[in-house]
Image (spheres, coloured by chain):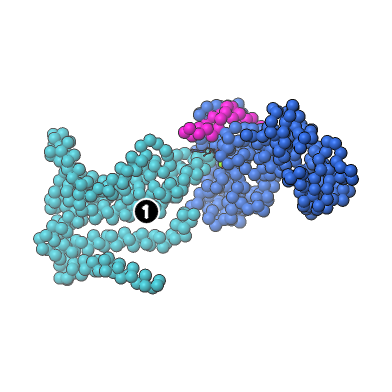
Amino acid sequence: MRLALIGLAILFLAAFLALPLVAVFSQALAKGVGAFLKGLADPDALSAIRLTLTIAAIAVPLNLVFGVAASWAIAKFNFRGKSLLLALIDLPFSVSPVISGLVYVLLFGLHGSFGPWLRDHGVQIIFAVPGVVMATVFVTFPFVARELIPLMQEQGVEDEEAAIVLGASGWQTFRLVTLPNIRWGLLYGVLLCNARAMGEFGAVSVVSGHIRGKTNTMPLHVEILYNEYNFVAAFAVASLLALLALVTLAAKAALEWRFADQIAAAKR
Amino acid sequence: MAIEIRNVEKTFGAFTALGGVSLDVRSGELLALLGPSGSGKTTLLRIIAGLDHADAGEVSFDGQDTRDRAARDRKVGFVFQHYALFRHMTVFDNVAFGLRVKKKAERPAEMDIRRRVDQLLTMVQLSHLASRYPSQLSGGQRQRVALARALAIEPKVLLLDEPFGALDAKVRKDLRKWLRHLHDDMHITSIFVTHDQEEALELADRVVVMNHGQIIQVGTPAEVYDHPADSFVFDFLGGVNRLNGVIEAGVARLDGKAVRVDGAVGADGPAVIYVRPHQVELGVAPADGVPDGKWSARVSSLHAAGPVARLELDLAGRALEAQLSRDRLSDLALEVGSWCTVDFRHARVFPAKS
Ligand SMILES: Nc1ncnc2c1ncn2[C@@H]1O[C@H](COP(=O)(O)OP(=O)(O)OP(=O)(O)O)[C@@H](O)[C@H]1O
Ligand SMILES: [Mg+2]
């Protein structure tokens, strides 16, 4: 029975996860390593890679700070509007990313609420990098907070109170007590947030305008290449994206393995 | 340090957790806050520590109002019910925490911190476990780490919330004695919360009995035990016989016979007579009936292990517990099933709660 269940799980994973992954890499390398590298070295591809990394570098730290602040407030304090804040944090999960993108267009687009004012001040958000970054930040917002809120709620406030009675300042308490208590949850949140920031398609697709070499991210670039029947290049970029995801996963697994005892201790 | 608590009130929503509490804690004493669950003990302790704020009233330390002093500036040692040890720090680092977070100007050199922590760990007999993590300790060991950590900042007051609550009976007793010795050595004003009356009576210099957010009685263990303020304290301290009787024309009666009682008698009506087992006086039943003013009872069981004998008696259908010395028992020559006379040396009566 146990073997059958394990076998079923492995079969399922192989069919729906491993197989596509293998397909991506084999397609990318179908015409040899040379073609693969050429696909990646294309200036537009390089620009897409650079933009994706830039977006992640902005969105992840921002959501790290927002996420920690929001979870701290929600888990450790009682205030009015707490459930509203919780609902807002979940919003990006509950609406389709395409809608999220559209909201930004409606707000900041040329015909949007702030559009004319922005145009008069020479600021372009939609169909430009700022819009892409904002859409990504919005879509990836829940990852850190959602990971931390249950953890912090479960841990309660006793540790913090103990630190304060011992004379620690608010900042010392956060740095020496709260942060170490949540570091694993925080790390997972950040890894997930990062994976999504790099892979986001829907919302980014709406606000970016697909300007090659300017507002194209890796997922958008893959789509363009694919639609142009440039399969090798498309899969080359796609395999790079997949590789980033695999590295993220491997990093998580390695950390879990390396610090297994600490993680267990933190949960007690 | 002396603590004065004046008319402190605290409500949570519509619920009154503390309804005007006043208390003087004397410098250097070991005070027990005793009361049933939900009586407001923890709330009072947290207000003293500055972790909660009173809605009204004031708390002062040595005559100085503490209203504007944040918890971190109060220099109180607080031992939490579940210890709240920092789980990612070793025992050593836990104890050193309070010293290391001090402002630069006041912080001892790392070497002095080490010396001080070593000293504290020796005192709580945990030097050999300095590099362990809290999850690798037993409950009693965690408890002592929490205490050492609280003492590291040389607090003026030590507050302990159910310090032995989560421990088994044997460890509890040992730690209790040990805490008493520690207090006798250091003389820090200490308040500990408990809902175990035995613990409060055995350990404390004075006991504060609380119920429903009110202080019912304050006194030495002997005062509280021998002169409970009301029926609640009697019931809560336990180890007492409750006999249903009546008050008629200002006299307490049990089965028609008058009971001599200490203190006020109260209004006429149904009443409960409280008698401690060692205040029950037994006598040899005379052959011809019962002498006036006394009751008679039959022995239903008898435990005579140790210096004191405990008897369960049947007094006209009521269970009555009595305690007497083994010598007195053999003088009376009582056995299970034999009859004896019963009288009460000291009894109290309170109107029955309708
Ligand atoms: N933060 C809070 N919010 C709402 N009610 C609270 C809060 N803290 C305490 N109370 C209520 O106040 C009352 C007193 O609580 P407190 O913790 O002081 O009781 P206690 O005497 O310490 O009881 P125990 O022996 O069970 O620990 C309880 O009825 C509790 O439900
Ligand atoms: Mg309590």
* Residue at position x 15%, y 38% in the image: A112
> Which image quarter has ligand 2?
top right
Between A48 and B80, the one lying in front of the other is B80
Q: What hue does chain A carry in this figure?
A: cyan
Between A112 and B237, the one lying in front of the other is B237
* Residue at position x 43%, y 46% in the image: A153
Q: Percent from the top left, x then y, of residue B130?
A: 57, 54
Asked if residue B30 is positioned above or below residue A55 in the image, the reply reads above
Q: Can you see residue B184? A: no
Q: What hue does chain B carry in this figure?
A: blue
Q: Can you see residue B336? A: yes
Question: From the viewer's perspective, is A184 left or right of A213?
Answer: right
Between B319 and A47, the one lying in front of the other is B319
Q: What stretch of residues is rendered in magenta?
A: B1-27
Whether the magenta-drawn stretch holds residue B12 is answered as yes
Q: Percent from the top left, x then y, of residue B235?
A: 67, 39
Q: Which residue is mark 1?
A: A187
Q: Percent from the top left, x then y, of residue A11?
A: 30, 70
